[in-house]
Amino acid sequence: MELLDSGLSQEDWQVLGSEFYSLRSLYSLEWDKDLALTRVFTGQHGGPMATVWDEAQVRLYIGSASRPDIHIYSAAGRQLGLVLWERGSVLAAGWSSAEELLVVEEEGTVHRYDVRGQESAPPFSLGKEAEEEGLQLARVFPAGVVGLTRRGALWVVPTLDRPRQLRLPLPAGANAPRADGGGPHAVGVRALAVLPTPAGQPVPSVPEVVVALDQTLVLVDGSRGVPRASAPTPGPVLHLEASLDGMHVAAFCEDGSIRVWAAEHLDVVTSLALADTASSLSEDLGMETPPDALPDALAWAGSRALVLSWEGVGLLLVGLGGAARWRAHPPGAGPRPALSPEPDGLRLAGGAAHWLLRAVPPAQRSVLEMGSLEPGALLFDARRLYEAGDARATAELLELVRAGTLPAAVAACLAAAAAELDPARQEALLRAACYGRAFLGIDPALPNAADVPGLGRRDALEVARSLRVLNALHDPEVGIPITMEQLEAEGWEPLVRRLVRRRHYHLALSVARAQGLPGEAVLSAWACDKVTACGGSLGDAELLAALKSKLDGAGGVEWANIASHAAGQGRPKLAALLLDMEHRAHQQVPLLLELGETEAALGKAETSLDADLMLDACSALWADVQRALATAPTPQQSVAAGQRFWTAMNRHPLACAVFLRYSAKQDPLVVTDVYEHTGHPERTAEVHLDAAMAAAKRGAGETAIQTELARSRDAYVRAQSKTRDTRFEAAQVTALARLREQQLELEASTSREGFLGLSVTGTIRQCHKLGLKDAAARFAREHKVPEKQAQLLALDAAAAQHDWVGLQAKVSRLDRYSLLTLEHYAHAAQAHGAPPEVLRWIVDRVSGDGAVARKAMLFSELGMQREAAALAPHLAQATPGQAEGGVLGSLRGALQSGVGGWVSRVAPVGLAGRG
């Protein structure tokens, strides 16, 4: 049937069950292809078409095949690119979701090309097993590739970002020989189909693959490790395809039957034999018997119907409900058109024309179907009558107002306009919608247009804007025949990227700005293309001026990307000039380092205050110095190379500090070199001293520790004449080195360990602890330890042995010439836990002037408060005139806490009052 007679261009509609399918011409193709000898691989959403000779057909009909170069065309048949194919036989090919052409060789290697035929990424393999055995079958899907080896191993590359091979499980009989022989390496797998993920469901890490065996259909789920479902088939499957919505799988079997299964559990949805289509074949094509030959192709037309094509016969449309209709190949499609599934239809590319077969959208059907009495059709007719000056327009419009269906009519016209492909009919439908919107407020019972979602002025404007973009895309110069439904599924950003890849920069920028998307990527891509196209025809300054004239004022342009491209094109000076336009240091610095502009990169990094960038720049500068020092033919040139680094470090102190802090943990030698050449030898000494301490802590050899100490001492000596007086530090490091040497000698002479690493006092204490009194005395003399301190160390060691009898004997030998007093002995004994009777015995030895006060004070210091309090009356009698101050005042202050109050209570009343 045809459309409603609206005075506009006609489309051929054909009913299939409860739906209509329309066939519309898209382009008259400009290529010259014999599709009987050519394989065509098409992309979705009006994507490009890649063609290559069908080597089997060429050998069969011609006898010899020329080189099978791959030609890439737009949907309008205009050549976009060419791949000079010099590799093995092409087993399969297809387009990824990023519009990248994937070409699979029989040896399992997958090559990647963009729409211009340039290699977009390095090739990858389906695995060593595929390379050794070769592939029998392969399928390209939007996210990756799946292949079957000749011995029945199923391999998949689930993602193209980081290609990795995964083996999928197959049932036991999958690698058995085929029932029909099929060659020496053929196995039981007849066909493959990759199941897309249904909308709204999470994308699995491994795709599901439907495998057709001799008599069985198997759904392989890689995430489970076992086949998930299976279903019998009436015979071997010859063609197998999954719908783009991932809900169904269709097959044509060897017995001439057509089957459709639900993908979830492989339940049969549709079963149809070719013999059942005889009446439609006679009615539509005038043929009596269905074709005996096998179909050339099977493809889905949207998600509710599939199409089979027979050479010399026509097309068979089969709906999910089992309805079937035949139709002839459209004019210019030739006897064997290439079928390209789309989410809402099917594209047919022939030798001279390109057609679109799709289900008529409900809104479009309600408005444009002949004899339709839907509100949208009445409004569309009213607008047509209004333009013709017919008074019936008012009557039809008032009828819609009285029935309250005017809002629905406006919405239907807008939806029909969005689904329409013909510009004239789009305009007519939009005019009808605007005509109805103007009268929405005429009846108080009807809502205002602005209050109805989807009917506002902005909604109509968005539809008109989107249609303007679609019409521009449909132009043969662009050749992207995308529909509104496909555009909504793909999105605006991927569409802009597709336009950029095809070098339609002006259209891409216009679309991006109209949709509120950033256009910087478009401008950057144009600039990179401009640099490549100019070659050497323009100088660096002239080309920079040309780029600035177009890009100045466009915020967010990534000048660093353009500079990187210019560097890749062999124009480093232009790259440096372009980098001056970049204001983001994290973009500038890495590229400056790649260009060898290390000092400029260091300055930019320090200005940005980014520690990571400063470290990268300093490391690169240091690496340059190391290379220069290694390759310099003369010492003078080595010195000059090093001096450049030190000069840069002095000029950028902040970056130098960051570099030194990092290097101190990674490579201390770098730090010492920097300090020496920047005139800070005292810091070099500190680095070596820290290294010696760290080596000692981790138990390194003594030679390494002494070496670091010697370097530290020498650096301090050098610092004397350059920065400040460091003689004290040098002497201390020398003493430390000598101390460790003596400790080692002590360990060797006494056959005792535990001396190394101790301090001077610790070493003396350890000698006393081990009974090495002579060694302790000698060590104290050599290190000029004062005699009193040496005796205190000996006392502490004696007290630590808890030999209280021996300690009391030493106390008995004290005289007035001794350097140590009873207080020293008492405190040492108390510190090592002496019994109270020993402490009292020592305190009782106190004699002479003020003995009572000394005893009381000593008892208080030792924490023996009761003994101190017991001496209080004797102390008061001994010093009657010094109650206010002197020793008693000090004692009372010492006993303020705890026993102090008690002392006051037991003291004489007059003394307590004065205290």
Image (cartoon, grey):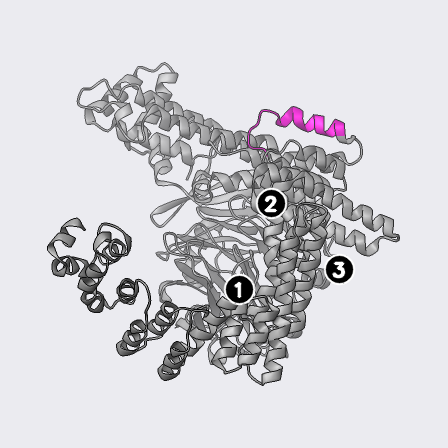
Q: Does residue 487 lie above or below 625 as drawn?
A: above
- The location of residue 765, given as percent across then percent down, is 49, 74
Quarter where residue 647 is shown: top right
Q: Amino acid at mark 2?
A: Leu
Name the one closer to the observer, 375 or 336.
375
Q: Is residue 855 left or right of residue 686?
A: left
Mark pair 1, 3: CA separation: 29 Å
| Residue at horizontal 76 percent and vertical 43 percent from the top | 644
Query: Which residue is the site of mark 3?
Result: 65
Specify which label sits upstream in the sequence, 1 or 3. Answer: 3
Which numbered dot is residue 292?
1
Check disc 2 and report its element: helix, strand or loop: helix
Mark pair 2, 1: CA separation: 72 Å
Quarter where residue 539 is shown: top right
Which numbered dot is residue 613?
2
Q: Is residue 275 left or right of residue 904?
A: right
Name the one closer to the observer, 725 or 585.
725
Q: Residues within 10 Å of mark 2 (few under 14, many from 20)?
A: many
Q: Does residue 217 lie above or below 176 as drawn?
A: above
Q: Does residue 305 lie above or below 455 as drawn?
A: below
**2 and 3 marks in contact (CB < 8 Å):** no
Which-is-in-front pick, marks 1 and 3? 3
Q: Is residue 403 left or right of residue 287?
A: left
Q: Do we see residue 722 in this rendering?
A: yes
Magenta region: 541-557
Q: Amino acid at mark 1?
A: Asp
**2 and 1 marks in contact (CB < 8 Å):** no
Check disc 1 and report its element: helix, strand or loop: loop
